[in-house]
Amino acid sequence: MSENGAALRVVAAGLQTTVQDLGRIGWARFGVAPGGALDDGATRWANLLVGNEPGAAAIEFALLGPTLVHEGPVPIVCALAGADFGATVAGVAQPPWHTFLLPPGATLALGVCQHGARGYLAVAGGIAVPVALGSRSTDPRAGIGGVEGRALRAGDRVPLAPPATPPERGLALPAARIPAYEAAQAVRVVLGPQDDCFTEDAIVTFLSSHYTVTREADRMGMRLDGPALLFKDGASGADIISEGVVTGAIQVPSHGRPIVLLAARQTTGGYAKIATIIGADLWRLGQARPGDTVRFRAVPVAEAQELAARHRAAYDPALLVPKPWPSATTTTTENGAMAAERAKAATTGEAGWTPEAVGRLLERAAALDLTELTLEAPGVRLQLRRGATPSATTEPIAPLGADPASSPADEPAPAQEPGEFTVTAPLLGVFYRSARQGEPPLVALGDRVEADQPLGLIEVMKTFHEVTAGRMARVVAVRATDATPVEYGAALFTLSPVE
C-alpha cells in the first residue's frame, strides 16, 4: 500500500489485466523475459499525459477492460491510451488520449473495444507496486512484479503513488498523432537470422501473403494462419540448436506457419526464425486481435535502426495540447460514499425495487445507449435487448441457472435461502471447475471457501481467470456445467455467507 493509502480497487478484472511498464531489461541471460507493455507507444503517451516519465508503470488490459474504484482522499489525474474501451466515470464518457479527473469513491468502468486489442491506464504519480529486478512489470511465469506477480482479479487493491495537486487544465494528444488500429496491418521486418533455412519461394510467400491472427494469442506470442513456409531440408529444417530469442522474432515450426514472439516470450528457442519485427512496429502486433491480418515487408538493418530512433523520439510532451477539464469532474466535490448512496437511491429507492425505480433505471440505460440490460434477483431474471424481435412462438423460460437442455419443470433451479448469494461469470468464456483435466473440482458442495479462494476458472484466449467468492462462504449449489461456454453474468455458484 502507498504511504497515502490511495489505491484502485478492482471490481471486475477484465482480460489479461496487469501492471506493466516498459519492461525488465538485462535479465534474459537468467531466463527472465523482458515483459513490459505490448504497445509501448500507448503506454508512453498515457504516462506523458498525466505528467509521468514515459516508462512509468501503467495498467494494461486486453479486449475487455476492468472496472476500478478510486479509494483515496483526493481526485487523481488519469489518462487512457490505446484502444477505445468506452470508458465512463459516473456515466460520463472518458475517451482515450485525454486526461480526466477521478474523484474519491468514483468508479471507472471500461467495456469492450471494437478496434485494436489493448488499452492502458496511467495515473499521475504512477502505480506504486514494488520494483522487482528493476521493473514493476508483471511476469506471471516468474511470479514477480505487479500485484503478487499475477494478473489482477476482483478484490485486488492497486496502490498509487501520492498524487500531486491537479493542474488547472488537462491535456490531450492531437488527433493527427492518434494511431489508427486497423484490422489489416503492414509490419516491417528484418529478415533472419535463419532465413537461409527457407526456400526462396518461402521468402517470397512470407513477404507477399496476408497472415491472420488466430485465437492462440496472448502476451507471450501469437500464432498466425496462412500459407505454409517450406524449409530447404524439409520439415527437419525447422529445428536448430536452441539459442536466445528477442521480442518480435518470428519462428516457424515444422508445420510452416509463423509464430510471433512478444514481450512475455521465453528467452530461448529451437525453431528457425525467418525474420524479426522491427522495434518501431512492435506496437502494431500488440494491438492486433484475433481475425486481424498482417502483411510483412522487409527493410535493411540500417533502416530499422533509424526507424527505432525516430519512434523513441516521437514521444515529446511538448506535442500535447491543453484542454479544459470536463464539467462533470470539475464540479464533483461530494464524498464518494455519498455519491454511491445517491446512485443506489436512484435505482432502488428507499423501499427497494419499485416500478418507478425500474423506470428510472431503464431511462438511464437508454441515455447510456445500452443495447442489452440484465436485472437479476433471487428467483427473478429480466433480460432486455433493444431492437430484439419477439419469436413467433413462445417457450417456457428456464429458471435462473437451470440446464437449458433439461425441462424447466423437470429440473427447476433451487430457490435461494435468505442471505445466500450468486457468483456469476465475470466475463464470457469457457467455465471449468478443475485446474487441469482429470483433477478433482476446485470446490465441492458443502465446502467452506475463503474470500480469494478460486471456485472455478474462465478460459478466454488460452488465458485462465479465477472466479472467487469475494467473501467467506459455503458452497450451496453449482449452477453451471463443467467445460461449457458461459456468457457474462451467467450464474456459476450459489453460496451462503459464513462468519
Image (tube, rainbow, N blue to C red):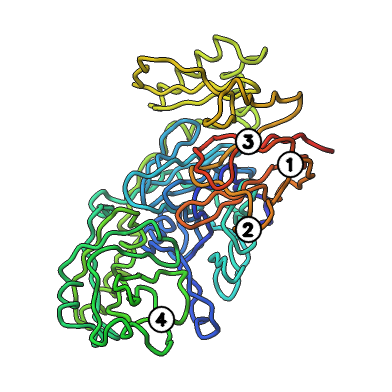
Q: Label 3 to label 1, Cα distance in Å?
A: 18 Å
Q: Which mark is residue 438?
A: 2
The Cα–Cα distance between marks 3 and 2, rounded to whole angstroms, is 20 Å
Q: Which residue is mark 3?
A: 479
Q: To which residue does mark 1 refer? A: 471
Distance (Cα) linking label 4 and label 2:
34 Å
Q: Mark number for residue 245?
A: 4
Q: Earlier in the sequence, mark 1 or mark 2?
A: 2
Of the pair 224 and 182, the residue shown nearer to us: 224
Q: Amino acid at mark 3?
A: Arg
Instruction: Assess disc 4: are there few (<14), some (14-19) or many (≥20) residues with their C-alpha within 10 Å of its C-alpha.
Output: many
Indicate which disc, 3 or 2, sits on the residue closer to the N terminus.
2
Q: Secondary structure at mark 1?
A: loop
Q: Amino acid at mark 2?
A: Gly
Which numbered disc flags the more N-terminal residue, 4 or 3?
4
Name the one closer to the observer, 113 or 120.
113
- Judge depth for marks 1 and 2 and give the one in front: 2
Q: Quadrant of residue 105?
A: top right
Q: Is residue 63 left or right of residue 443?
A: left
Residue at image x 41%, y 52%?
119
Q: Where residue 129 sits in the image (x, y, percent)? A: 61, 61
Q: Position of residue 173 (x, y in %)?
A: 32, 51
**Does residue 487 sit above or below 458 in this rendering?**
above
Specify the quadrant that holds the N terminus. Answer: bottom right
